[in-house]
Amino acid sequence: MKRIKLLILLLSCVIVSSCIPHKDTIYLQNKADSTNDSIPNNLTEIQKPYRVQVNDILNVRVKALDQETVSILNPTGEGNLNASSAERAFFDGFTVDVHGNIRIPTLGYVNVLGFTTEEIEKKIETQLLEEQFKETANIFVSVKLAGLRYTANGEVGSPGSQVLFTERVNIFEAIANVGEIPVTGNKKDVLIIRQYPQGQKIHHLDLTDIRVMQSPYYYIQPNDIIYVKPLVQKSIGTGTTAISSIATIASIMSLITTGILLYSRL
């Protein structure tokens, strides 16, 4: 009987210890010993301007005093452009090719790789004034990314790719748009897989630490991949809460008791 009690006690300890701690489910806690890719002793993080990469899609609009003279540079039916349509943005936009160029009517190939959208605006405007227009034409060029596309995988509500039509998205907004991280997701080590000219790099974020807001990876960039790892509790299949753990213990104890009773009757 002592062995059975010891077995039940040991089993109970294992299951209780496998519960997900409450502190691992709360975002933005004040921690003193957290380790992530945040910038220490820096209260405000200034988001660095994004630099265009291969396969990005740019929306280019050109305006002038005489709009007909620049109509060829703008999409057909611009007035009816549905800004919420990723498909329309794809077909009307200019895709950056493997050489870092976009092909613009009358201008030909323009290299945009590694430039910010503001720098591309000035570059196109300068080229138009040098080759086709005069200062009196009052050329105005607007360049924007055709949506911020990213992918979220792992322990999120709805894994997959998303396109947000905004220029500034933080990690919490990105995750909220794919259905939040369930209790079984590891919020303390969220991976950001980011594209660089040299290749891909993996960065780590602890979303339970308030200092994550100071991280250089707090704001996502186009083509980022967000991966949320599952907790060990999901792999071993134990209860994620105290109630579910108690239910599991009760079920196991019931099985053990039934086995003992059946064995004692033999």
Image (cartoon, rainbow, N blue to C red):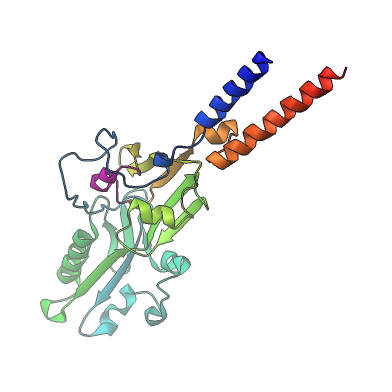
Q: Nearer the viewer, residue 235 or 139?
A: 235
Question: Which picture quadrant has residue 245?
Answer: top right
In depth, the one of 154 and 247 nearer the eye is 247
- Please state the total of marks drawn on the protein image: 0
Q: Is residue 216 visible?
A: no
Residue 248 higher or lower than 176, as above or below: above
| Whether residue 59 is situated above or below residue 225 in the rendered picture | below
Q: Quadrant of residue 128?
A: bottom left
- Magenta residues span 208-219
Q: Position of residue 209 (x, y in %)?
A: 31, 42
235 in the magenta segment: no
Q: Residue at x 11, y 76 (%)?
A: 135
Please indicate whether residue 247 sits to the left or right of residue 128 in the image.
right
Q: Is residue 91 above or below residue 10?
A: below
Identify the residue at horizontal 69%, vertical 15% (top origin): 1
Residue 187, image quadrant: top left
Residue 26 visible at all: yes
Of all residues, the one furthest to the left in this rendering is 135
Residue 98: x percent and y percent? 36, 48
Residue lying at 43% horizontally and 64% vertically, measured from the top left: 90
In-front residue for pair 135/176: 176
Q: Position of residue 3 (x, y in %)?
A: 65, 14
Q: Residue reaching furthest right?
A: 266
| Residue located 58% across and 27% down the image | 12
In-image side of 134 versus 76 (left or right)? left
The quadrant of the rendering that contains the C terminus is: top right
Does residue 255 sit above or below 167 in this rendering? above
Residue 186, position as x, y percentages in the image: 44, 39
Q: Is residue 213 magenta?
A: yes
Task: Looking at this view, name the residue that lies furthest to the front.
Answer: 1
